[in-house]
Image: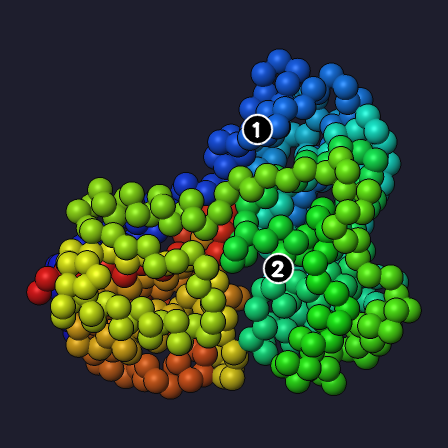
């Protein structure tokens, strides 16, 4: 028997509406239109302006889950001025385009389609001269979608290394540091090939702090990481003997100075390279906050830079929710607490789920019996881990409802098996591909009993 109340159902719907408002605000097409405009022969990107008349060719390239929608905006702005284009996107994250070719490829583990697309992109930009303008569209997933291994390594080597890094709980910053040193494209590699053309990167940020050299592993910016950093990451997680031998040998050669490191700040290849962040987690969270206020909630933004183990971050949120309900601090109900960023899951079980579903499950367990709370956690790209759900929604009655169905919340959490848990409850959040990706959005709604 379902024990949810009408009030809980209303809050759940509010949570969905708040989540979708946040996602809509960072749609790839809308993001390009907010930051770019064409007036006559003048392309304006934020405060910079470019004379289109001085370029013989305009090439659109890129990689990421929002790449197709971002390219659509540029096609409508620039029309036949676009000479050629190719963008790698995750399978299913497509929109109709006329001048830019789309290659669908694997994410989060790269595949052969992505490798071929990356190779074709490098061939396009490798022909650039001083009279070429290259517009590079970068969004979440761009790192996995631009897999072009250095000589001596295979795509399989990169796939295996990515799986190991994901499973050990490495952060996106650490994963991308490794990726940059195994790739021809990443860590400034694309900028090196595009020189001396003018290269403009339009970026939807999916990393905490919006660090340019971490987003998509920084294909167009100087690399602040080193081979030494890579070796320290292997040692930190005890995976040096687990990664492919070729990968370990390549990193060790770099540490020993036998392989040149990626280009650094001050390298002349970046002299005609410019960047603009066109969408971020903060924009998403602010839009969600606006929607929450419209629905009558007082709001608090915790942070858009939250990292750490998902279960532990969930317990911090649980503590804040209980404080609000019990003491009215730091704000009184009806209240909406929002946070962003990207947590990690150290996989110890063999179940199916993602960090957002795991967050919701851990929160549900911590809030068991607190009927005045609803929690929703979702990935802004519409995909949570290797599942078709963006995340999940839970409340103070989730555990009770689960137990009436014979589900064991603690066992599901221990086995990293949140997807079937919430699927049986009907509490998965499914949006389909959203054509954006600015990390995660977490929403906690609290009302007076």
Residue at 62% x, 50% y: name it: 212
Q: Nearer the viewer, residue 422 or 241?
A: 241
Residue of label 1: 47
For the N terminus, the quadrant is: bottom left
User: Relative to the observer, which residue lies in front, 89 or 406?
Assistant: 89
Whether residues under marks 2 and 1 lie with C-beta atoms below 8 angstroms apart, the answer is no
How many numbered marks have been drawn onto this rendered protein structure?
2
User: What is the quadrant of the C terminus in the image?
Assistant: bottom left
Picture layout, residue 160 above or below residue 214: below
Q: Which mark is residue 107?
A: 2
Q: Is residue 283 left or right of residue 399?
A: right
Question: In which quadrant of the rendered view does residue 128 lie?
Answer: top right
Q: Residue 432 at x, y = what percent?
A: 45, 52
Question: Percent from the top left, x then y, of residue 388?
Answer: 47, 61
22 vs 234, nearest the viewer: 234
Whichever of labels 2 and 1 marks the residue nearer the N terminus, that label is 1
Compared across the picture, whether 241 is left or right of 366 comes to right
Identify the residue shown where x is 32% and y is 81%: 409
Q: Nearer the viewer, mark 2 or mark 1?
A: 1
Q: Is residue 31 left or right of residue 160?
A: left
Estimate how packed mark 1 is, as few (under 14), some (14 to 19) or many (20 or more) residues with alpha carbons within 10 Å.
few
Q: Secondary structure at mark 2?
A: loop
Q: Is residue 139 above or below residue 315?
A: above
| Residue found at the far right of this picture | 258
Q: Which quadrant of the figure has residue 181? A: bottom right
CA distance for labels 2 and 1: 34 Å
């Amino acid at each position: 028997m379902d024990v949810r109340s009408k009030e809980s159902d209303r809050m759940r719907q509010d949570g969905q509406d708040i989540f979708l408002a946040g996602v809509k605000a960072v749609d790839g097409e809308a993001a390009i239109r907010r930051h770019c405009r064409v007036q006559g022969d003048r392309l304006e990107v934020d405060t910079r302006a470019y004379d289109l008349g001085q370029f013989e060719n305009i090439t659109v390239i890129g990689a990421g889950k929002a790449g197709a929608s971002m390219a659509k905006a540029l096609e409508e702005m620039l029309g036949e001025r676009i000479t050629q284009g190719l963008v790698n996107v995750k399978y299913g994250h497509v929109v109709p385009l006329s001048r830019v070719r789309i290659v669908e490829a694997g994410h989060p583990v790269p595949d052969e389609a992505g490798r071929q697309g990356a190779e074709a992109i490098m061939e396009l930009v490798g022909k650039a001269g001083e009279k070429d303008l290259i517009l590079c569209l970068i969004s979440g997933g761009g790192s996995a979608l631009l897999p072009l291994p250095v000589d001596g390594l295979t795509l399989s080597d990169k796939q295996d290394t990515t799986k190991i890094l994901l499973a050990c709980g490495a952060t996106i910053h650490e994963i991308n540091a490794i990726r940059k040193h195994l790739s021809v494209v990443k860590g400034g590699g694309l900028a090196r090939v595009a020189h001396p053309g003018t290269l403009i990167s339009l970026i939807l940020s999916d990393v905490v702090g919006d660090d340019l050299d971490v987003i998509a592993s920084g294909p167009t910016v100087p690399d602040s990481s080193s081979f030494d950093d890579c070796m320290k990451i292997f040692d930190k997680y005890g995976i040096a003997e687990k990664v492919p031998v070729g990968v370990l040998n390549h990193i060790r050669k770099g540490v020993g100075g036998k392989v040149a490191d990626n280009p650094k700040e001050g390298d002349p290849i970046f002299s005609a390279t410019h960047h603009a962040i066109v969408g971020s987690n903060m924009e998403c969270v602010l839009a969600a906050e606006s929607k929450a206020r419209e629905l009558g909630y007082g709001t608090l933004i915790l942070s858009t830079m939250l990292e750490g183990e998902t279960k532990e971050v969930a317990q911090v949120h649980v503590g804040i929710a209980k404080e609000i309900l019990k003491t009215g601090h730091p704000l009184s109900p009806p209240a909406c607490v929002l946070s962003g960023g990207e947590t990690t899951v150290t996989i110890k079980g063999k179940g199916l789920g993602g960090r957002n579903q795991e967050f919701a499950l851990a929160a549900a367990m911590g809030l068991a019996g607190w009927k005045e709370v609803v929690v929703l956690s979702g990935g802004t790209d519409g995909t949570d881990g290797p599942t078709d759900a963006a995340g999940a929604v839970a409340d103070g009655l989730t555990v009770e409802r689960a137990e009436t169905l014979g589900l064991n919340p603690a066992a599901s959490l221990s086995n990293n098996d949140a997807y079937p848990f919430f699927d049986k409850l009907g509490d998965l959040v499914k949006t389909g591909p959203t054509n954006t990706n600015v990390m995660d959005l977490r929403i906690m709604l609290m009302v007076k009993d």
